[in-house]
Image (tube, helix red, strand yellow):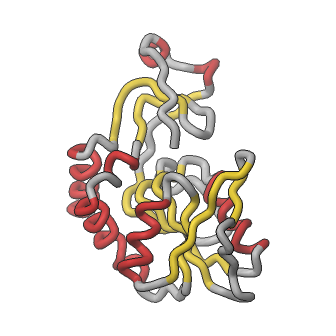
Amino acid sequence: MAETKDEVLEIFTRTGALQTGHFVLRSGLHSGHFFQCAQVCQDMAAVTRLTELMMPQFRGLDFATVLAPAMGGLVIGQEVARQTRKRYIFAEKVNDRLALRRGFKFVPGERVLVVEDVVTRGGRAQETLDLVTDGGGVPVAVAMLVDRSAGKTSLSVPMISLLEMSYPTYEADKLPPELAAIPVSKPGS
């Protein structure tokens, strides 16, 4: 497992996906570290390798469809679907809420794997799980490249992560002086 973690960190560092500075995360929390997975997703060989490293965790998991929330999960979700040979669909933001569009639907009882890039608190992942349930599907798990909570986030289904990392996060009014001294950036998710 340590070899896998080292390889994943090397890929994130080499592609510029793991960044340092002062960031406002989608959750509203501040951090000195940010995973900009869009950077790693420019390199399809890296995306292929990250998915290959995640594949053993899918053994014994029964699902027919991969659902990825836009924007972060799109590329990795499609690659997971390709490597598992499952149907792939995605959810889009409509008025800042996720929705299924483009005629995407679930058949009653359809088993769905949600795939995300990074999960910090799990809000967007849970919103995606709710889309599955509300649409008549059955969510089976959430797979992600990075669990920023290092296993502390709890969802209504099992979580599968390639990398668990816990960089400190702070409320805006509780920043440590060294982070407050750095200009803030909101890079987006």
Q: Residue at x 66, y 52 (%)?
A: 93
Place of residue 161 in the rendered image (x, y in percent of width and height, measured from the top left)? 44, 63
Residue 86 is at least partly visible in this image? yes
For the N terminus, the quadrant is: bottom left
Q: Residue at x 51, y 43 (%)?
A: 189
Is residue 46 shown left or right of residue 181?
left
Residue 154 is at least partly visible in this image? no
- The answer to whether residue 60 is above or below residue 166 is below
Is residue 32 shown left or right of residue 8?
right
- The answer to whether residue 43 is above or below residue 34 is below
Between residues 74 and 120, which one lies in front from this camera angle?
A: 74
Between residues 177 and 94, which one lies in front from this camera angle?
A: 94
Place of residue 165 in the rendered image (x, y in percent of width and height, measured from the top left)? 41, 48
For the image, the number of numbered tags is 0
Place of residue 184 in the rendered image (x, y in percent of width and height, measured from the top left)? 48, 20
Q: Residue at x 72, y 67 (%)?
A: 131
Place of residue 115 in the rendered image (x, y in percent of width and height, measured from the top left)? 51, 66
- The answer to whether residue 64 is above or below residue 24 is below
- Seen as rendered, the residue at the extreme right is 134
Q: Residue at x 78, y 72 (%)?
A: 134
Is residue 140 shown left or right of residue 50?
right
